[in-house]
Amino acid sequence: MAFWRSLAFSAVLLLLIHASHCFYLPGVAPQDFQKGDQLQVKVNKLTSTKTQLPYSYYSLPYCAPEKIQDSAENLGEVLRGDRIENSLYAFKMREPQMCNIVCNVKLDAKTAKEFKEKISDEYRVNMILDNLPLVVPLKRNDQDSTVYQLGFHVGLKGQYSGSKEEKYFIHNHLAFTVKYHKDVLTESARIVGFEVKPFSAKHEYEGKWEGKTTRLTTCDPHAKSTVVNSNSPQEVEEGKEIIFTYDVEFQESDVKWASRWDAYLLMNDDQIHWFSIVNSLMIVLFLSGMVAMIMLRTLYRDIAKYNELETQEEAQEETGWKLVHGDVFRPPTNSDLLCVYVGTGVQFFGMMLVTMLFAVLGFLSPSNRGGLMTAMLLLWVFMGIFAGYSSTRLYKMFKGSEWKKVALRTATMFPAIVSAIFFVLNALIWGQKSSGAVPFGTMFALIFLWFGISVPLVFVGSYVGFKKPAIENPVKTNKIPRQIPEQAWYMNPVFSVLIGGILPFGAVFIELFFILTSIWLNQFYYIFGFLFLVFIILIVTCAEITIVLCYFQLCSEDYLWWWRSYLTSGSSALYLFLYATFYFFTKLEITKLVSAIFYFGYMLIASYAFFVVTGTIGFYACFWFTRLIYSSVKID
């Protein structure tokens, strides 16, 4: 029966995976456009995988409207450094345009230097039309498919033929392609794609510059000639005049509006994800076999034999986990801190579980920029009630009485550590004049969420948890602690803790690669079905490896399992940080010190959060296991 239940559960999860690939809630209402309707392109941040520091579009001397207007931003967008603003790029629906002049810019020493720095750091320009990001389509050499890169490069470095001197060239001509899906009955259309091919073109004209009415000799709509290559590129040098131009082409598409994100979210490496799942399932099956052997054979035999003993003298001749029944539930050292960490872990676990459920069901649409981060922040705040409840329930079991002190530490300790790191990183980013620096207004909003909502909810949960009857231990605790015998080298706490973290990390490290690539290489990641299944596997792995090592520890007559159970699975965070370090040196091309500090600062926060979550899972698994086995033993 257990096998068929697990098979049915796996089938349901596979259906969730399939559903997450083919369905999402778009997040915004569709907009219908008639022929000739105005289309306004918005500009977003400049991004670089080499520096990881975003900048606003107008931090470079691009063509700017008379009044720059910011679009409404949610909390997640601000934290991501998104700055969505209006631009001079404007089209008319289904009316192609050729060689439209935006403006001309004459470079001085300062502006030329700014462009060169951004080109050297491989910055990309991001734009938005009807809530769709601008992408550059690239054909894959090995497959007959197209991949999309977000935004286009500010420019490129190169050399003229016959010269060894490196020059900087700017992409000043943009060939836009707007794809639309037309309604046969109403003749209205919806935008389903926004692509661009950037070119560097040294534009020329005769006579005086007359603004947008100037007739270019290199790109003339009257002569039906436009820019098709970058054979005569525009240099970035002091004193050079740069003319920005664009073309617009409209293409009818069979793609419907509800499916317009599918091309961006297309997963080209699904076989690797399946390999990750199979790899993780092998680990789970191995651990499940060990747990089953312990539970069904060893424990069943030991408990039956122990309960059959007639005299106390016979019981005292026994060895192993049964001998420490009088000490196994003795409160650990620093029990208050353990309660705080367990409560924080419950808060994080609830946030991650609900977020992934919403994502798998399609509620966190990619079109809702910043929606994922906003949802996680709000869920973290409201999960504070479960954090307070969990920490004080455990605290009361340890015979604690100062529940308010534990509640305050639960509400403030983890956020305070993260906030300290965050403020240092934000100061460094602010010093670089990056748009990724969080404004003071947003800082106040975050502080209000913490102290105005999260802290009170933690105290509410703590009050409810402390009012509940204390959890009764299945066996009584002796007054005098039992001496722990000398342990074998492989049962050394440091060694067993480090060994315990390897398998949970091994269950997730392949999926971790794609998550890091999404965050640090600015690529789409929307395969929450796989991520949810890996999360379930992580939970099972953390629980099982902790139970196995806890059993071996108790068999060695070492009853100090409380903290070790937390650290056993929590040590997987150490391997996560080591992998992040390996990823930094092998996959990223970060050269600036500030960018490196930025990367390792945020990966330290992520590893700390991973430690809290996995440690809590392991602790509760071991807590359940010890209560189960000792409640089965008859103690006189």
Image: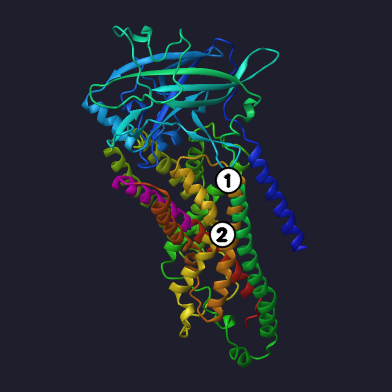
Residue 580 x, y percent position in the rendering: 43, 54
Where is residue 177 shown, x and y percent of the image?
A: 53, 22
> Looking at the image, which residue is at 74% across and 58% down?
5
Other-residue count near label 1 (Cα within 10 Å), few / some / many at <14 / 14–19 / ≥20:
many
Magenta part, dominant SS? helix
Q: The C terminus appears in which quarter of the rendering?
A: bottom right
Q: Does the magenta run of residues contain 602?
A: yes
Residue 622's label in the rendered image is: none
Residue on which disc 1 sits: 356
Magenta-drawn segment? 591-612
Query: Does the residue at mark 1 contact the one at mark 2 (Cβ under 8 Å)?
Result: no
Residue in the picture at 66% in, 25% down: 254
Q: Which residue is mark 2?
A: 507
Going by the image, does 540 lie left or right of 577?
A: right
The number of discs equals 2
Please state which amino acid type lies under the numbered disc 1. Answer: Met
246 horizontally vs 180: left or right = left
Q: Residue furthest bottom?
A: 313
**Image quarter of residue 311:** bottom right
Q: Is residue 362 magenta?
A: no
Image coordinates for residue 437, horizontal then vertical, percent: 34, 37
Q: Which numbered disc, 1 or 2, marks the residue that appears first in the sequence?
A: 1
